[in-house]
Image (spheres, helix red, strand yellow):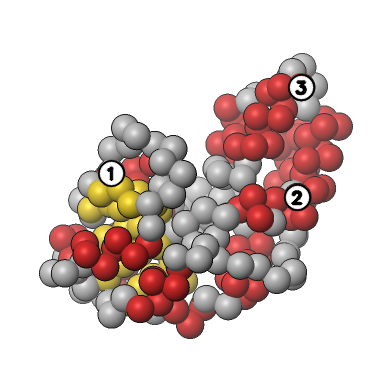
Amino acid sequence: MIRALIYDLDNTIYPVESIADDVFAGLFKLIDDLAEGISASDIQTAKNELTRRPFQKVADQFGFSDDLKEQAAELLRNITYNKPMQAYDDYRYVKTLAVEKFLVTTGFVKLQNSKVKMLGIAGDFKQIYVVDPDSTEKTKRHIFTQILEKFNYKAEEVLIVGDDPESEIKEAKAVGIKTVLYDPEKRYTDAEADYRITNHRDVGELIL
C-alpha cells in the first residue's frame, strides 16, 4: 500500500518552457556574452537544456567557464518569479489523490519558492523541500531518506514522481524507493523507472 507520494516541481507540475523566456532572460544574455569558444548551435542547445535540467549540470556539460558559472549562479540566486503561472492541466488529478504528498525540488531557493507561490500549490503538500544547488551537504537522495525517517514510511510505501531520469528517478532508486517517470512527450523510451506515465491521473492506479 502506498502511503505517500513525493513530487518534483519543474516539468512535473508545470512546464518550465512556459516561463523560460521571462525567468531566464538575464541568464541567456549572460551566456551569449560570456560563452567563449562554444558554437552557436551548442549555445542554443544549452539554453534549451536549461528548461529541463539544473544550470550546474548544463554548465558542466557544455564547458562554461568558471567566470560564467559564477556570474550565472549569482544571478540565479537572486531571481524570483512574480507573474501568473499555470500548472499542467492534468495536475488537477494530483490534488485528488488521498495520500500524503511532498514536494522536493532542486533549485535556487528564492526562485523555487516564488514558483510555488505563483502556482498556488503549497497547500497541496504536507511539506515542501528545496534542495539548494549551492549546498554540498544535501541532495534529493538525502531528502528522500529524511522523509522516510521523519514520517515513519517504509521505502515500499512511497512513490517518487518526476520527469528527470538523472535526478529524482536516479536518486530515488539509490535509496530503494520505486519511481514514476512523468513523460507526457514520450521523450524517454528507455529510462530506468519502475513506471512511466503520460498523465498524472495514472498515478491513481499505482497507489491502490
Sequence-wise first label, 1 or 2: 2
Q: Is residue 28 above or below residue 89?
A: above
User: In terms of secondary structure, where does tag 2 sit?
Assistant: helix
Q: Residue at x 38, y 52 (%)?
A: 198
Number of residues whose C-alpha sits closer than 10 Å to that of mark 2, classed few (under 14), some (14–19) or many (20 or more): few
For residue 3, side relative to residue 144 (left or right): left
Quadrant location of the N terminus in the rendered image = bottom left
Residue 208 relative to residue 105: left or right: left
Circle 1 is placed at which residue position? Answer: 193
x and y, in percent, of residue 13 in the image? 49, 62
Q: Quadrant of residue 126?
A: bottom left
Q: Are marks 1 and 3 in contact (CB under 8 Å)?
A: no
Q: Earlier in the sequence, mark 3 or mark 2?
A: 2
Horizontally, residue 125 falls left or right of residue 106, namely left
Residue of label 3: 40
Residue drawn at x 59%, y 72% is: 119
Where residue 34 appears, x then y in whole percent?
A: 82, 30
Query: Could one spot residue 166 in this view of the protein?
Result: no
- Category of crowding for the residue at label 3, using alpha-carbon neighbours closer than 10 angstroms: few (below 14), some (14–19), many (at least 20): few
- Image coordinates of residue 78 in percent, x first then y, are 75, 59
Give the mark nearer the N terminus: 1 vs 3: 3
The residue carrying mark 2 is 21
Q: Assign a secondary structure to mark 3.
A: helix
Q: Residue 97 carries which label?
A: none
Q: Residue at x 62, y 75 (%)?
A: 117
Callout 1, which amino acid?
Ala
